[in-house]
Amino acid sequence: MGRRLQRWRALDARDRWRLTGCVVGLWFVHASLAVFGYGRTRRMIERVSRRTPARAATPAEIADAQALARLAASAGANALGEATCLRRALLLHGWLRRRGLRPALLLGLPTNAPAPAAGDFSAHAWVELEGVPLLESDAGYRPFVPASPAPQA
């Protein structure tokens, strides 16, 4: 029996469903990004996942969100093609918002990144919940800072 099947069988029923949901969700996010681009995809995800009022996450919910992030990373690495960090982050952002939580979708650079060479650029997308990065691998990044504050409505 292959290692992937062994890992699948080791999951409980809830995590099997969540992993399947991550695979399907990543394909929808991928297709939406390809057709509509980042801006429209993010607006659609936020519109579909809107829950009011958003509330602070408990420590148990943060731990569960971290487990969900690991499942999304596994789905992205083992499904039909590698899912980028942006696809995984958009999926997690929407999923956690549907639960009524306040996730932060962040885009940024490695904290100790050297100055990029001409034409060389590397960025990362990740989700934090109550200031906690959901994956350990996301801890070494700093978010982009807007050049100017958003206009007040």
Image: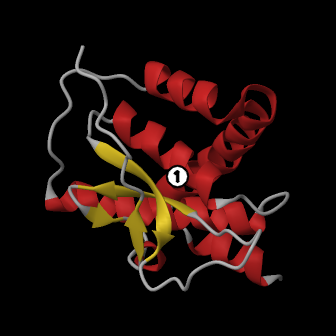
Q: Residue 94 location, x and y as percent? A: 46, 37
- Label 1 sits on residue: 89
Q: Residue at x 78, y 63 (%)?
A: 82
The color scheme shown is secondary structure
Q: Residue 20 location, x and y as percent? A: 65, 49
Location of residue 63 by image quarter? bottom left
Location of residue 153 by image quarter? top left
Q: Which of 60 and 103 is in front in this view?
A: 103
Q: Residue 147 location, x and y as percent? A: 38, 46
Q: What element carries label 1?
A: helix
Q: Quadrant of the N terminus?
A: bottom right
Q: From the viewer's perspective, is 16 left or right of 79?
A: left
Total numbered labels: 1
Q: From the viewer's perspective, is 118 left or right of 101?
A: right
Q: Which of 15 and 99 is in front in this view?
A: 99
Q: Which residue is drawn at 71% across and 79% down?
A: 117
Q: Which of 109 and 74 is in front in this view?
A: 109
Q: In this view, does 67 lie above or below 13?
A: below
Q: Which residue is drawn at 27% across and 33% down?
A: 100
